[in-house]
Image (cartoon, rainbow, N blue to C red):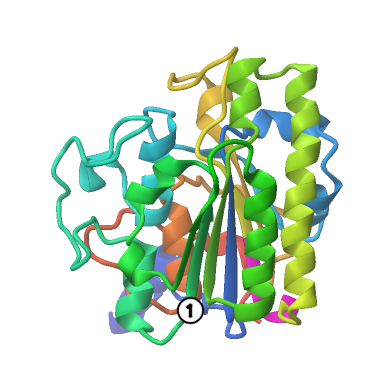
Amino acid sequence: MKKLILALTILFTGFQLKAQPNHVKHIILIGCDGFGAYAIPDAKMPNLKQLINTGSWSLKARCVLPSSSAVNWASMLMGAGPTEHGYTEWNSAVPEIPSAIKSRYGLFPGIFTLIKEQKPKAKTAVIYSWQGIGPLIEKDAITFVVPGPNGDNDNFCADTAASIIIREKPLLTFIHFSEPDGTGHNIGHRTPAYYKELENVDKRIGIIINAVKKAGIANETVIIVSADHGGTGKGHGGKSLDEVQIPWIANGAGVSRGHEIKNVIITYDTAATIAWLLGLKEPQSWRGKPVIEAFNSK
């Protein structure tokens, strides 16, 4: 009977038994605002597609609803949805619903809180283009916080992040780019201008990839690329797949090569994946699951 119970336990919880890649020392999370997964097949993005071809990916990951910015950046970094963390609008600066719990930094506990509490000596960095990211991060728990200047600042953020990666080699670096969201709003999704802007997004991703190589940490780094939402017409916030489906791409140490992820991914799984890779204990309040299908156990 005991052997039968053990066998059933392994069968139904086997996903939990997969060991983390043991040589991950750095994680780079690149978030591209308004980047609908629908655009990738036709986009001229050689750097991103190289990450796809040599890594694991899904073009069917989903954001939380509403398909807007602050609620989804919060969910990505906080490992839970809006009913837990309380940010419910595109530009939420404070939770519209009181957070279910708060960390010592006064916010729902996000991935940077976990790192600060469980790996207090680790360096972390956040570089962001949209000022709305500021209220969503635990600034006192992060080593380097760099908001981009007002205006067109994605290039500034790419160059600054690259400099920090090369010089400081943080455990976790989160880089937020405002595009292609601005082009989606001003000109429209699925337009020639939108696809043209994705070429610029790809160049910025290339800057980050090259920085990882220049820092000499490529063999011990995982790069994750995702988005807060997609879009349709000149907007987002609704329930269409163009708005809800986002890319989720992982590449680097311990990542399976050339693998399309079949399991369901929700944006709050990103924080859970980072926590799993770093051996961090998740709070009970988190709802995310690590995307372990993307990784091998070697």
Q: Is residue 192 left or right of residue 181?
A: right
Q: Is residue 118 magenta?
A: no
x, y percent for residue 200: 78, 40
Residue appearing at x 56%, y 23% in the figure: 231
Q: Is residue 63 left or right of residue 51?
A: left
Q: Quadrant of the C terminus?
A: bottom right
Residue 158 in sight in this render: yes
Q: Which residues are magenta?
A: 218-223
Whether residue 194 is situated above or below residue 142 in the rendered picture: above
x, y percent for residue 273: 48, 63
Residue marked by disc 1: 123
Depth check, front residue: 225 or 179: 179
Residue appearing at x 15%, y 51% in the figure: 100
Q: Quadrant of the N terminus?
A: bottom left
Instruction: Tell me where residue 101 sits by quadrant.
Output: bottom left
Q: Is residue 219 magenta?
A: yes
Residue appearing at x 62%, y 22% in the figure: 184
- Local secondary structure at mark 1: loop
